[in-house]
Image (tube, helix red, strand yellow):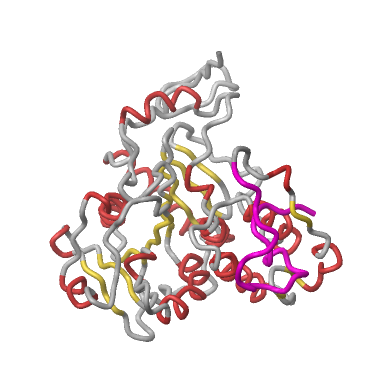
Amino acid sequence: MVVEFYTLPDAPSIWPGLGPGRQVSTNSSTDECVSLARKWLQGCLSSHPECRRPEPSEPQLPTRVVAVGSCDEETRVVVTKPGDRGEYAALSHCWGGAHPTVLLSSNLEALQAKLNFDTSSNTFREAVSFTRRLGIPYLWIDSLCILQDKDDLSDWEREAPKMSSVYNSATVTLSAASSSDTSGGLFPSQGIREPRQRIVHSLVEPEAPHLRARAWVLQEDQLSPRMLHFRKEELAWTCSSCSRCECRIRPDDDKPYRSRMFCLQWPTMVMDYTRRSLTRERDRIAALSGLAGYIERCTTDTFFCGLFYEDISFQLLWYIDRDAHPPRQDPPQARFSAPYAPSWSWMSVPGPISY
């Protein structure tokens, strides 16, 4: 058993080593959690040089966004015009096996008038509500801002490469870390939260969020300058300067959460990425292309089918790590059925790789 001692924020302590803490809320949708999230966000925007945008103005809006409105009746999809600017949040979530409301050519006009959510879209509805309460007018959700027509991928092929700038320019990214699909909602229920709170910050390793197993989420994590994580245990915050959580008053800023030495980290990120799941094998390149493009823009390096040129002598030393393959599953095939990448690239093979 591990016991943590702390004082309440306004209660003095005669022991310097006993720091202040917060009572964790029973639900992340409480007014206290919204107030805390706004405090973290405003503090980052005003006092974190590493997190500031290169330009002082509002970011350019993506091709489509969800206008959250002042109430659910005003929520709708907006098609922006070139040069439109504004603050927006982005959502990082797991589709899972649910069938949420999605944007199609057939319903685009209707969703521009009003956006309704069914029970399969609980995560979307709660993300809209939290964004509204943060005072942010727009929200970007992949399945509602990129056409999901199965017989026409042209819009997806245009918009997917822009995802790096979408997440990188967002005011904040909401991470639905506690939900395995879009029906689970953004806020974990009290029944789920209370047992998990027993291990917050203890020596017991917390349960890894289901979202971390999704390959697309790696670049969303890396490219978002600020993230609110709706975990089973508590609400948490990460940015380029520090990490925070609901139960602790003091930020963890000894090591900034994100280092910008991307090229040195690339092999580690590739190993992590290849151990995550993808619904469609054709996304193996697309789900990482935004992050690769961002690194190219931030450095003098060049990206070649999963490898960076300046470190290519090491990055060619990849191999299929069969020991890392999940047990009780069939081993991955030697190559993809379609030639997505040249044979010298790890992108040409399924399953986990190491160096």
* Residue 14 position (above or below residue 93): above
**Going 69% across and 68% down the picture, which residue do you hit?**
306
- Percent of width and height locating residue 15: 57, 17
Span colored in magenta: 329-355
Instruction: Indicate the quadrant containing the N terminus: top left, top right, bottom left or bottom right.
Output: top right
Is residue 319 shown left or right of residue 98?
right
Q: Position of residue 124 (x, y in %)?
A: 30, 55
Q: Residue furthest left?
A: 73
Q: Is residue 122 magenta?
A: no
Q: How many marks?
A: 0
Is 147 situated left or right of 251 in this image? left
Quadrant location, the C terminus: bottom right
Q: Quadrant of residue 141?
A: bottom left
Give the left or right position of residue 90, taking residue 212 as reference. left
As drawn, 190 above or below 140 = above
Q: Is residue 341 magenta?
A: yes
Residue furthest to the bottom? 82
346 displayed left or right of 182:
right
Q: Residue at x 70, y 59 (%)?
A: 334
Q: Picture quarter containing residue 300?
A: bottom right
Residue located 83% across and 60% down the image? 317
* Residue at left offset 61%, top offset 74%: 293
Q: Nearer the viewer, residue 42 or 329?
A: 329
Q: Pinpoint residue 34: horizontal percent, then vertical percent.
A: 32, 45
For this orientation, the residue located farthest to the right is: 313
What percent of the width, then of the height, locates residue 255? 66, 46
By secondary structure, the bulk of the magenta-drawn segment is best described as loop
